[in-house]
Amino acid sequence: MRLELVPRAERSTAMALVSPVIAIGLTLIFGVVLFASLGVNPARALYIYFVEPLTKAWSLEELVVKASPLVLIAVGLAICFRANAWNIGAEGQFTAGAIAGSVLPIYFPDFQSPVLLPAMLVMAMAGGALYGAIPAILKNRFSANEILTSLMLSYVALLILDWLVRGPWRDPGSFNFPESRLFNASATLPLLAEGGRMHVGILFGLIIAALAAWRLGVSVHGFAIKVTGEAPRAARFAGFDQKRIILAVFVIAGALAGLAGIAEVSGTIGQLRPEISPGYGFTAIIVAFLGRLNPLGIVIAGLLLALTFLGGEAAQITLGLSDKVTRLFQGFLLFMILACDTLIAYRVSLKFGHRAAGVTGTADQKMVSNG
Amino acid sequence: MAIRMKLVAAAAMLALGAGAAQAQDKLKVGFIYVGPVGDHGWTYQHNEGRLALEKEFGDKIETTFVENVSEGPDAERAIERLARDGNKLIFTTSFGYMNPTVKVAAKFPDVKFEHATGFKRADNVSTYSARFYEGRYVIGQIAAKTSKSGVAGYVASFPIPEVVRGINAFLLGARTINPDFKIKVVWVNSWFDPGREADAAKALIDQGADIITQHTDSPAPLQIAAERDIPAFGQASDMHRFAPDNQLTAIVDNWSDYYVSRAKAVMDGSWKSQDVWGGFAMDMVEMSDYKNMPDDVKAMAADTAAKIESGEIHPFQGPIKKQDGTEVIGAGERLSDEVLLGMNYYVEGVEGDLPQ
Amino acid sequence: MVDAGIITAIALTVITASTPLLLAAIGELVVERSGVLNLGLEGMMIAGAIGGFAAANLTGSTAIGVGVAAVAGAVLSIPFGILVINLAANQVATGLSLTLFGLGAAAMVGEPFLGTPGLKLPKLDIPGLTDLQVIGPVLFGQDGLVYLSFVLVAATSWFLTRSRAGLTLRAVGDSHDSAHNLGISVRKVRWMAVLFGGACAGLGGGYLSLAYTPLWTENMTAGRGWIALALVVFSSWLPWRVAIGAYLFGAVTILGFHAQGAGIRIPSQFISALPYLATIVVLVIISRNKTLLRVNTPACLGKPFVPAR
C-alpha cells in the first residue's frame, strides 16, 4: 500500500479552506486520546486549550500581543524564504534591533520628546537590518552559507545583550541586578486601550503584513524575489542581480525583526533585560511556513500559534496539565496542519500493489512534474 | 511530578477573576517557575515548598503552578492569568519577574504577591530571599580543611550580586582556616546546562583545584568530582545520590516554612507587605547531612553554622579587603544588608576578574 | 614548557564535548546529502537522551542503553519522514515542529527518571597502551561511542564516494527528478537516510545522558542539536570536515573555560561567544573554494519530491 500524490493543476481553494479543518479534527482526536490517558476530561481540556482564551477580552488582547512580534518577524522571513535565502537568525536580528533601539532611552534617560519614539524605532530597524546584512554579505562575498552564519550570529547577539545589561547598561539603581533602567513614558510605546497590554506596536505587524501582501503581489521587486528563489538562472537572464536581492531580503527581514525587538522592549517589557524573547525568532520560522509564506496567511498562523501558547498556559493553570503535555500537543497540531497542507497542492490517493513501471520518464512528464 | 487532576467547579472557568474565588472557600495559591519542576535545583525546591503547602493545609488550599515561564514578555501574562483565575496569593520565584509582578499587583489590589530575590515592594507585594551566603561560608571552611592544594574550583552561573556574594563568603570562610586559600571561578553563562557545567568543573580540576563547588543548578559538576574522586558540594537540594562518596554537604533552599507562614497570614488576614531575608535562623537555608569528612570537620561545620544562626559569627565581618587590596571595612565591623545586596566586587584571594 | 598532563586533560575534555555534536551532525549530513533538511535534530537528540538513559537504568546495561538511544532517535524521525517524504510537507516547518514534539515527549517519558543517577558508559582500558603518556588515554582510553563517531565519519566518507548506494543517495539529493527517471526509488533512499539521521542524533543524545553527564533532565541537550545542524553546513557536506567542525567548536569552548580558570581579563560572555565566531570565521575561509562547494552541495536540499507518473 502506498500513498500517491498527484499534483493538482491549480492549488485548490476549497482544500485551502478545508485542510485546516481536517487538521484540527485529527488533532482533536489525538487530544481526546492524550488527555483521557492522562486522566483529564478531554472535552474540558480541549475547551480550555482552544476556546477559553477566546472568550475573554483580556486574553484576546494577550493573544494579539503574543502574535504580533511573531507576525512581524515571520513576514520578513517569508520574503527571505521566497528568495531562497535561509535566514534562521531572526532571533539575533530581533535582539540587535532591541539593543540599537534602546540606546537613546538608556544613555539619555531624561530626554523626553515626541521625536524620541520614532527615533528609537528607526534605530532599531537600522540595527536589525545591519545585523541581518552580515550573513548576506558573507554569503555574497565569501559564499559562506547563511544557515550557519545567521544562526551563530543569533547566539552572539544574545551574549552581547547579556553583557550589556549585566555590565555597561545596568541600571545604577538596581543593586547591580541585570536589567537596564525602566524607560520613561515618552520612550514607551503608548497603549491602545487603558489597563491592558495592547500597545501601538501591535499595529506594526498588521500594517507590515498588509503592505507586504500588496507589494509582493504587484511590484517588480516582489516578482524579482520570487523568481530569484524559484529559478535563479531565469532571474539572471531577466537581469535581476541575485546578490542585491539576497542582501535586500536579509536587510528587510532584519529591519522587521529589529522593529519587533524594540516593540517588545519598549511596549511590552519597558526595559532591556537579559531575556527579552521566548524564542520569537525561531517560532516565527514555523509561523512563516505555516502561513505558506503569504503575509495574510502569516497573520492567521501567528494568531493560531499564539493561541496554542495561551491555551497551554491555561491548561497548566486550570487543569494542572504540565508544560510538557502542552509542547507535545503543540508539536502534534503543527504536524497535522503541515500534513493536511499537502491536500491543497496535491490529490492524495492510496494505491495497492506495486508501482507501475515508472522508469520511462519522458520530457513531457518532466515538464508536468516541474510545473 | 505527577499530572494532577483537578476537579474545580466549572464556574471557576467561566467566572471572571474575583468572582471565581467566592464560589469556593479554599485559598487559591499560584506559583510562577522559571525552570522545569524537574531541574533538581532552584525550581525543584520552590515546588517542594508548594507541596508543603498542600500537605499542611490539605483541602483548605488549592495550588497551581506554571513552569518554564520565560522572564521576558510572557511573565506578565502568566502572573495576570493566575490573578484572574482567583489566586489570592501568588509567588513569583525568579528575579526577572520583579517588574511584571509589580505591574500586575497594581491591577489586583486584593491579591497578595510574593516576589523572590527582588527589591521592589508595594502594599500587596512582599519580597523574600535567603541568605545562602551563610551556607557558603560554612562550606568554605570545610573546603579549606579538606583541600590539600589550597585551591577550590567554583562553577558559577552569571555575575550577579547573589553569586558574587556566595563566592566571597566561601572564600572568607575558607580563609579563616587557611589564610592563603584561593578559588578559581569559571562562568558558564547559564543556570542549567549539565554539559557546560561538567566541562567547567573538569577545566577547574585540571588547573589544580582539588575541591569543587557550584552555583549552577545541575548535579553535573558533582558527578565530575565523583569521577575524579575529589570532594564537592551540592547546590539547592541534597544531591548526594549523584556522588554518594564525594558530596560533603549541600546548601539546601528551604522555602516550605516561609510559604506555609505566608499562606496562614492570608487566611487569618494578618498578611502585610514585608521584606524577608532569611538564613539559618529562619531555616530558609539548611545544610544537608555532613558526610565523607572526619568528625572534627563535621563538628567545626556544625559549630560555625550554629554560631551564624545565633549571630555570633557574621560571614562578612571585617577586616575585608577587595581583590586589589583596598579595605572595604575594618576589623569588627559588619557589611550592611544593603551593601551585601548589591555586592559587585571580589574579595582578596579570588583569582580572575569579575566580569562587569 | 607546557605540562603534558594538562594537554592530555584538555584533549580528553574536548573529546567529550565534541562527540555528541559529531554523532548528530554526521547523521544529518547523510540526510541532507539525500536532499532532505531535518531541523528536528534537537528533538531527536533529546529522544535519544531519555531513551538511552531509561533503557540503561531499567536493564542495567549501558550497551542496551546505546542501542535504545539510536532506536529512539530513529523512531522520532518517523513522523518527520511520513510528512516530508510521503506527503511532501514543508521540511523546515516540519523539522521545527519535530523539535517541539520531541522535547515535550521526552520530558513526559522522563518524569519517573528525574533525580536518578545514571550508568556511565565504560571506557576502554588496554593495559600498556592506555598508560602511555598523553596519547595513551586520548587514543586508547575512550568509550565506545567516541570510536563509533570516528568509524561513522570514515564509513560515511567511504559510502558517499566509493559505494554504489552512496552514489545513488547523492544522485537523489542532487536531482530527484533525474534519479527517479533512472528508476531509483527516491522515497526509499530518503527514508533510509532520514532513519539513519534519526539514529545518529539519538546516539548523540544518548552520549549526553550515558557518558557526558550520566543523568536525565529536561532540555539537557541545551541547543546542541542546533550547533550540530550548523556544523553540517560548516562541513560543506564533507564527512571529515564535520569532524573538524565538531572538534573546533568543542576545543574553543573548553579553551575558553581554561582561560577563565587561569584568570584571563575578558568578559565571560565574549569567551562564550568565541566558538560561534570561530566557526563563522573558519567557514568564511574554507568557503573560498567554490568548486568544492558546488560539487558537494545537494542541489535538491529542502525541496519536496513528488514522482511524476
Image: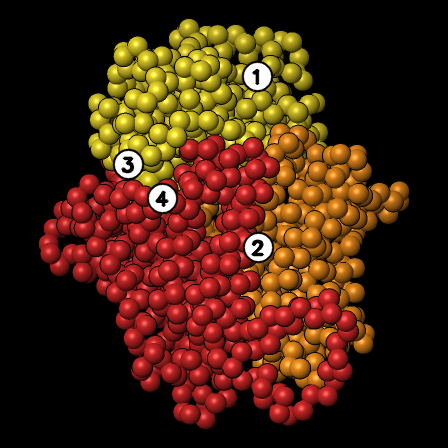
Q: Which residue is mark 1?
A: B288
Q: Which residue is mark 3?
A: B99
Q: Position of residue B88 (x, y in %)?
A: 31, 23
The answer as to whether the residues below labels 4 and 2 share one chain is no
Q: Nearer the viewer, mark 1 or mark 4?
A: 4
Amino acid type for the residue under numbered disc 3 = Asn
Q: Nearer the viewer, mark 4 or mark 2?
A: 4
Q: Secondary structure at mark 2?
A: helix
Mark 3 is surrounded, within 10 Å at the Cα level, by few (under 14), some (14 to 19) or many (20 or more) other residues, namely some
Amino acid type for the residue under numbered disc 2 = Leu
> Would you say residue C220 is visible in this rendering?
no
Which residue of the protein is positioned furthest toward the left in this rendering? Answer: A113
Chain B: drawing colour? yellow
**Label 1 is found on which chain of the structure?**
B
Q: Nearer the viewer, mark 3 or mark 1?
A: 3
Q: Which residue is mark 2?
A: C98
Chain C: drawing colour? orange
Q: Residue at x 47, y 76 (%)?
A: A11
Q: CA distance from mark 4 to mark 2?
A: 25 Å
Q: Secondary structure at mark 4?
A: helix
**Label 3 is found on which chain of the structure?**
B
Chain A: drawing colour? red
Q: CA distance from mark 3 to mark 1?
A: 34 Å
Amino acid type for the residue under numbered disc 4 = Pro
